[in-house]
């Protein structure tokens, strides 16, 4: 594999009933990235669907993946993809929903704890490393006393839905910025006050 190849994994759950859930925003970002590259998801030898393409002619190659299993078993597919493409963990970008960030906000980080996110926890365990790059897509905290587990498995609210395309687009821009300019430059762009 070329040294300019990146594995981008959008976390989520399989099936139409989960497709528009907050928990699936990582896969929405994966769809957006594939669409920008003109690539389509195909079944793969690993337990994932994969779309591949170049960011621009002569530019970095993106391997965009959506694991076939449920969120809390994301580690196995991610580990299999890294092995299949012979990529080190520092070429892995995980895109996932984040309760601890306000809705409509994107934050980037490398390493750190899983913050109770079962998908991130499983990837950390399966790769023996928590130092992959993460594009954290803010979904905010549940209102009132609603349980977090119920909240993430619900679709975005009617008011939020208007902002979701921009949020997904921003997160896809963040992935491209990391790949093209590095994490620090991307953080400076996406973490600065608007």
Image (cartoon, rainbow, N blue to C red):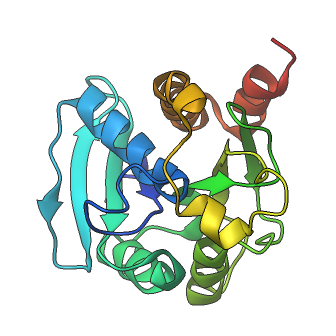
Image x and y of residue 107, in percent: 74, 40
Q: Is 39 situated left or right of 31 in this image?
A: left
Quadrant occupied by the C terminus: top right
Residue 112 horizontal/vertical position (percent): 83, 66
Q: Indicate left or right for 115 with 59 as reference.
A: right
Q: Nearer the viewer, residue 41 or 102?
A: 102
Q: Is residue 150 above or below residue 40?
A: below
Residue 191, by quadrant, is top right
* Left or right side of 7 for 142: right
Give the residue drawn at x 59%, y 26%: 159
Left or right: 186 in relation to 9: right
The answer to which image quadrant residue 40 occupies is top left
Query: What percent of the width, then of the height, locates residue 58?
Result: 29, 27
**Residue 175's x, y, as percent?**
53, 38
Q: Is residue 134 above or below residue 156?
A: below
Q: Quadrant of the N terminus?
A: bottom left
For the question of whether residue 25 can be seen, the reply is yes
Q: Is residue 167 visible?
A: no
| Front-most of residues 12 and 9 | 12
Which quadrant of the view contains residue 171?
top right
**Residue displayed at 31% across by 23% down:** 56
């Amino acid at each position: 594999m070329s040294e300019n190849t990146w594995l981008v994994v959008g976390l989520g759950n399989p099936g139409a009933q989960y497709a528009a859930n907050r928990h699936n925003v990582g896969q929405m970002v994966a769809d957006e990235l594939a669409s920008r590259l003109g690539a389509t998801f195909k079944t793969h030898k690993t337990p994932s669907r994969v779309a591949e393409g170049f960011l621009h002619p002569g530019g970095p190659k993106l391997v965009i993946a959506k694991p076939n299993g449920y969120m809390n078993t994301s580690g196995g597919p991610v580990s299999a993809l890294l092995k299949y493409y012979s990529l080190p963990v520092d070429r892995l970008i995980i895109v996932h929903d984040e309760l601890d960030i306000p809705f409509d906000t994107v934050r980037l980080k490398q390493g750190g704890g899983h913050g109770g996110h079962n998908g991130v926890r499983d990837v950390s365990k399966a790769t023996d490393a928590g130092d992959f790059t993460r594009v954290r897509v803010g979904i905010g905290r549940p209102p009132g006393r609603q349980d977090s587990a119920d909240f993430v498995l619900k679709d975005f609210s009617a008011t939020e839905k208007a902002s979701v395309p921009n949020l997904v687009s921003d997160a896809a821009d963040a992935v491209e910025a990391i790949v093209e300019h590095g994490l620090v430059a991307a953080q400076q762009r996406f973490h600065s006050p608007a």
